[in-house]
Amino acid sequence: MGSLDGVRDWETFKSFVFGGVAGPLGRPVSLASFLLDDFTWPSEPYSFKRTNLLIHLLTGLMLCWATLNLLRLYGISEDKAIWIALLNMGLWLLHPYMVSTTLYVVQRMAQLAALFMFAGLAAYLHGRRLLASKPLLSYLWMSGALGLGTLLAAFSKENGVLLPLLVLIVEFCLPTALRFNKPDWRWRALFLWFPTGAIAYKVYKEINFSADLWPTRAFNQVERLWSETRILWEYLYHLYVPRIEGRGLFQDGFLISTGWLEPITTIFAALGLLALLLIAFSVRHRWPFITLAILFFFGAHVLESSVFGLELYFEHRNYVAAAFLFLPIAAASTWLIRKISPPLVATIYIALLGMLAVLTWQRATLWSDNDRLQTYWAVTSPESPRAQNFLAVQLFKNGQPDQGMAFLQEAMIRLPNSSLLTMQWLLQRVLYGVANEQDFQLAKQRIAHQRFDAQAVLGMRMIVEELITTGKPIQYRQWSRELLHAMEGNRQYQAVPLFRRLKPYLEGLLWLADGQVEKALPLMVLAMDRYADTDTALSIVAHFGNAGYPAEALQLLDKAQSIYEKQPVRKLKRSSEVYDLEFPRLRALLLEDLRKLSSHRNETGLPEKTAEP
């Protein structure tokens, strides 16, 4: 919103809603939903969080409807079905694990995917109940539920494509009588088997056990799979044994499994998951709700906790996965009523819901104070470079630079592979004007062997921006160029398009600040080629124009024009009409600047200074 200067018209609406980069499908439904709260940014966060809370409540209602229709299919009496569905909804809705998904605004994407998946499941089960008596109406309900539900869920967040798989899991857990009364096989092939097969094929195609598959991650695919066995157990533990706050956003300190026995809990976690699956299949006829809880949990994690190169651990991945985890607990209420007095059963469940409500209230209170929340995460995550970086920055913000430097130095020793901490340490020394050549040399030596970190690249950009806008010593710029070359020599940095694009751009800015336009120009041309983005190209043109080099800026403007003509319209950040006006306007300004510069040089007798194209 902010980069577009607000969503003001149809063109900016299209750019914002259909220009998403958070996932391969762009997530336009989620992006459009943010316009319910405001059309620009910065804005007031409150309205965004309020909308997320309303979506959470609505998602709970959809889960209640889905559970109720499921229980009706099982032939459970209406009174019992209503109370079990309400209990399942309440246990899910009030669980403190759901606070982060609700109050972390961007996770509206996960919320909306869950909303449409639960709604699609509820509508499917409604149609499924009509199959024997009203088959045509039944197929209309089931087809619409799967088609529309999957589409809206997937365009909210990609794991929405799992809806057909989750429906198959529900079908697998239905009573035997219903499994004999299935929808026509051709319908099942089209709406259930084919989409699920496509997902399985996509997962299969992603399998790649190369040692360094993901340069931007501290783990490879095998290590991710090993680690996820432990993570899934941690999810389950905290879903059944709730706490006020969890790991938060500082997940980079999670201990990665590098083998079946490293750590030793990896093998036990893997065997435990296998045992869970065996239990699920063995109790399918006697306790189908336990089977449903287990298989639905695994099914919802198929994409985000498997072979894809995502970060290892996030609570919001359980927003859908936990849908039926509490159903066996809720259903047990009818069994308990037969064993003990109904008032005691009611007291037990009211106490359980009350405990979850209190924990959720306490967690929401912590989330209401951003600094306190992040400090809590950082203090409880000593192995997270991001967490230690946050604590150090807080010390600098509080006017304690000596303590901040000491903290960073200690953290760098404790976490020697973190390029983020190295770059933050150098950045702060540059900002305070105390950096020397030895500091840059030390950073070069460390960065050359440390793992890639996108925030370290951001730190390098901040250093360069500081050096071209303030009166720091000129040697800093030369040392920064050497540091950029050291980063380029690191194989992991070479493999990341983000750095390959940014490196010539930053080096070009440094040369431009030194007045070495003949060295800056080819680097900026290379940066424009690598970015292949019109707005980036125009910003480079502006750098040269503002630095007093209109002739070179005009050369770059021609290059920017060719990039604009090749860039797909859907990837443009603004409308074509805006660019069609912007290029002539910039050209006229630069020609006027060139005329004034030539006139000034003629009057003063100064020679022309232009670089070779």
Image (cartoon, helix red, strand yellow):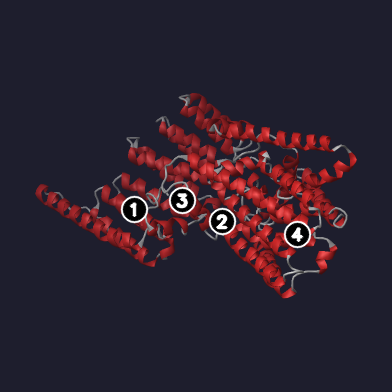
| Badge 1 or badge 3: first in the primary sequence | 3
Q: Is residue 360 above or below residue 57?
A: above
Residue at figure coordinates x 84%, y 38% from the top left: 342
Question: Alpha carbon of mark 4 to alpha carbon of mark 1: how far?
Answer: 55 Å
Question: Alpha carbon of mark 1 to alpha carbon of mark 2: how far?
Answer: 34 Å
Q: Is residue 447 visible?
A: no
Other residues around mark 1 within 10 Å, as few (<14) / some (14–19) / many (≥20): many
Question: Alpha carbon of mark 1 to alpha carbon of mark 3: how far?
Answer: 31 Å
Residue holding disc 1: 540
Q: Is residue 259 visible?
A: yes
Q: Nearer the viewer, residue 93 or 433?
A: 93
Give coordinates of residue 556: x percent, y percent. 31, 58
Give me the disc on residue 13.
none
Residue holding disc 2: 156
Q: Amino acid at mark 1?
A: Ile
Residue holding disc 3: 35
